[in-house]
Image (cartoon, helix red, strand yellow):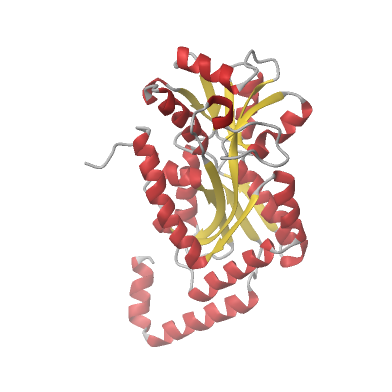
Amino acid sequence: MSSTRMRLIGLAGASVLALSATTAAVAQDEYPSEDISIMAPGGAGGGWDGTARAMQAALESGVIDQQVNVYNRGGAAGTIGLAQFVNDFEADPHQLMVMGRVMVGGILLNESEATLADITPIASLTTEYEAIAVAADSPYETLADLVAAFEADPTGTVWVGGSAGGTDHMVVARIAQELGINPGDVNYIPTAGGGELIPAMLSGDAAAGVSGTSEFAGQIASGDLRLLAVSSAERIDGIDAPTITEATGLPVEVSNWRGVVATAGLSPENEAAVVAMVEEMHATDSWKQSLEANQWTDFIQTGEDFQAFLAQEDETVTKILQQIELIPSDG
């Protein structure tokens, strides 16, 4: 809350507080009272963008009467968008933002002034595993071929994926860690989303790419890319690829999750209204179809459960980034 708003409350006293409570209650009853905007803090074609547009379709399928607008603010593992979201939309329940594990790492790696403490957790939505793919004409027929080249020439083997410090980067760093490769020798090129990732792979600028399984699905189906492995513990139904461990013997397992948050400063009534809307969205046929089409695993947690999960993820991701030397260890 701004200092100006605090002074006004101090001057007006109980009458202003009573009016604020009445306004919050009306907002809950009528929510949403205007169009909803959802920020995807990454580029078009990426996982956050896909999640936001799946939410848009589900909400407009009968959950609300208003329109849902999706827009992109990519860069720095989502922290550029996060900063805008935090600074521009305080206490506005009609503004939402998709985020996920990548942003948790991005906040740490980029030393972002805007953090998870500056948003209102609403719900986790999906989880999926990572995929490693190469261009169809790549000389690497298997992940074992790629890993052998990587071990022989770490700096000469170019990987491309999402933001530095994100889940894609963690996959490559974990493989390097298991091979005994210095993290500083990993040649990883971060991108803002699928719109940059796929061209880098197809042009030959990168030896391999890492992303969520859903983001490569179209190019794999068309034959432009070849899927080498997934980062799950076991093979995934419907995906014709071994696990990283199965393909190489390296015990690397990494998963990604995505969710949605609101701005800070919401009244309890408005926070409850946003959570209720997202829960109703989660139950729609449209959302269920998006889960199936994108091979996303349902991962719904709302309110306090999601808040507790975020706190645990902050600790987990911090430890991982320290282990692979992307951020300094405590002490």
Q: Quadrant of the C terminus?
A: top left
Q: Is residue 267 left or right of residue 112?
A: right
Instruction: Name the residue rendered at 47%, 35% in the picture.
Output: 170
Instruction: Name the residue rendered at 73%, 23% in the picture.
Output: 224
Instruction: Name the residue rendered at 64%, 69% in the picture.
Output: 32
Q: Is residue 186 left or right of residue 129?
A: left
Where is residue 97 shown, x and y percent of the image? Answer: 55, 54
Instruction: Name the residue rendered at 52%, 48% in the picture.
Output: 100
289 vs 110, nearest the viewer: 289
Residue 281, quarter of picture: bottom right
Q: Is residue 179 visible?
A: yes
Q: Is residue 105 left or right of residue 55?
A: left
Where is residue 36 shown, x and y percent of the image? Answer: 64, 60
Q: Quadrant of the N terminus?
A: bottom left
192 vs 142, nearest the viewer: 142
Residue 146, quarter of picture: top right
